[in-house]
Image (cartoon, rainbow, N blue to C red):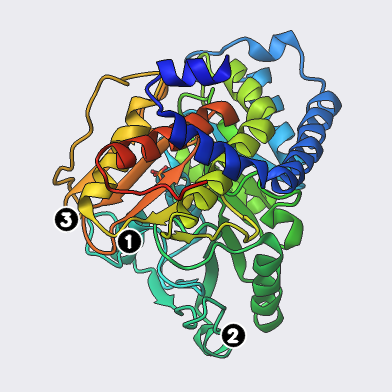
Amino acid sequence: MINSIYEQAGLRPDVLAYCRNIEKDLEKRFKAIDEVAEYNQMKVLLAMQKNKVSAGCFESSTGYGYDDLGRDTLEQVYADIFHTEDALVRPHITCGTHALAIALSGNLRPQDELLSPAGKPYDTLEGVIGIRKQTGSLAEYGVTYRQVDLRPDGSFDYENIKKAINEKTKLVTIQRSKGYQTRPTFSVKQIGELIAFVKSIKPDVICMVDNCYGEFVETIEPTDVGADMCVGSLIKNPGGGLAPIGGYIVGRKDCVQRAAYRLTAPGLGKELGASLSMNRPFFQGLFLSPTVTAGALKGAVFAANVYEKLGFDVVPNGKESRHDIIQAVVLESADRVIQFCKGIQAAAPVDSFVDPEPWAMPGYDCDVIMAAGAFVSGSSIELSADAPIKPPYAVYFQGGLTWPHARFGIMMSLEKLVEKGLAVLPSL
Ligand SMILES: *Cc1c(COP(=O)(O)O)cnc(C)c1O
């Protein structure tokens, strides 16, 4: 029966058989992913119970939003999950970049220096910091920036990090996920080691982690290993696919408060900010997040193994342990990248009839193709893929609200490649 519905969906039997065979070998990996989800589900549940989440928390506030029980309880739940003193979780935070921007600009002052000890940060932060000239950047406010690149093997360059820390260094930013780079994603343990090293040189420096795509992939978070602040987007892992907008900052009370003064206004901070009707989806999405993240992770591991065994380079590889939900597949040609994305799009619940095309997206130096058929626009916890059309022709794949859907998306991507003669299945 299952085969016939896949055939009805347009998958040829040999693609299905090949993928089924790959999946058989992943049982152990999947079991380990389920165990992390089991732990994190309990962590979230206990935080909700401890804070007495009730039907009243789903009421919405308007206007100034004073005394918003749901909003304040949600923030306490986040603080408990991340084991921090405080949290800021708001629909007014537009996206991950915005959350990072207020965490940075709230906590840095003119003459301070920002240090990135793990190489170049995410593209959109270049404008925020002023690495790239940008009106309103931290550079315009007199905040200087220093960066220490990773060593060629992807490890931290401790010697040069030590040299880079000086009397001006106020805040250190560490990006957990590789994002759209080819370096490895850092484990929480590695991040803890880096933070300990930085603090051994300068104890009062604020260590901030860009946690995007990393939430609930492990049983601990960067705030469990010394991070003063952890920042992320609710249209990625912690929104569980239900949050239609939003971002979060968790951490030390003074750090979160300074960020809140930047989000609203000095003196107002967390007291204001109507939740509108976001409290319910934020709670419910957070509740689902551990298992949603597990589904996306299984999809990433499955994709790595499906494409690795066809001879393509995949980052991370099929066996490596995971610290975020992103999978890169190096497809070596523009045609393959385009067909891969068409397959992901064709598998979507929304806009499956749309054909993605490469286009000259602002801010990129080449055409980019994106596949996304998401309930929430731009949500990348939902099944999505994107790729710059340039060598090495790598496609970045992430998300899937359920493991069956992630699996189908990957099978469809391969179906499109096989249809066009761009991939050859090994004989079983
Ligand atoms: C997604 C992401 C961001 C923020 O991106 P937005 O599109 O602004 O939400 C920042 N850093 C990393 C590593 C990310 O993956």
Q: Which residue is mark 1?
A: 126
**Label 1 vs label 3: CA separation?**
18 Å
- From the Cβ of disc 1, is ligand 1 less than 8 Å away? no
Give residue 352's position: percent from left, percent from top.
Answer: 32, 21
Which residue was labeled with disc 2? 158
SS state under label 2: helix
| Of the image marks 1 and 2, the number of the one nearer the N terminus | 1
Residue 127 is situated, as x and y percent measured from the top left of the image, at 29, 58
Mark found first going from the N terminus, 2 or 3: 2
- Residue 366 image label: 3
Indicate left or right for 231 with 286 as reference: left
For the N terminus, give its image quadrant. Answer: top right
Three-letter code, disc 2: Tyr
Figure check: 3 above or below 379: above
Report how far apart the C-alphas of labels 1 and 2 lie in the structure. 23 Å
At mark 3, the secondary structure is loop
Q: Residues within 10 Å of mark 2 (few under 14, many from 20)?
A: some
> Residue shown at 32%/66% (left/top)?
139
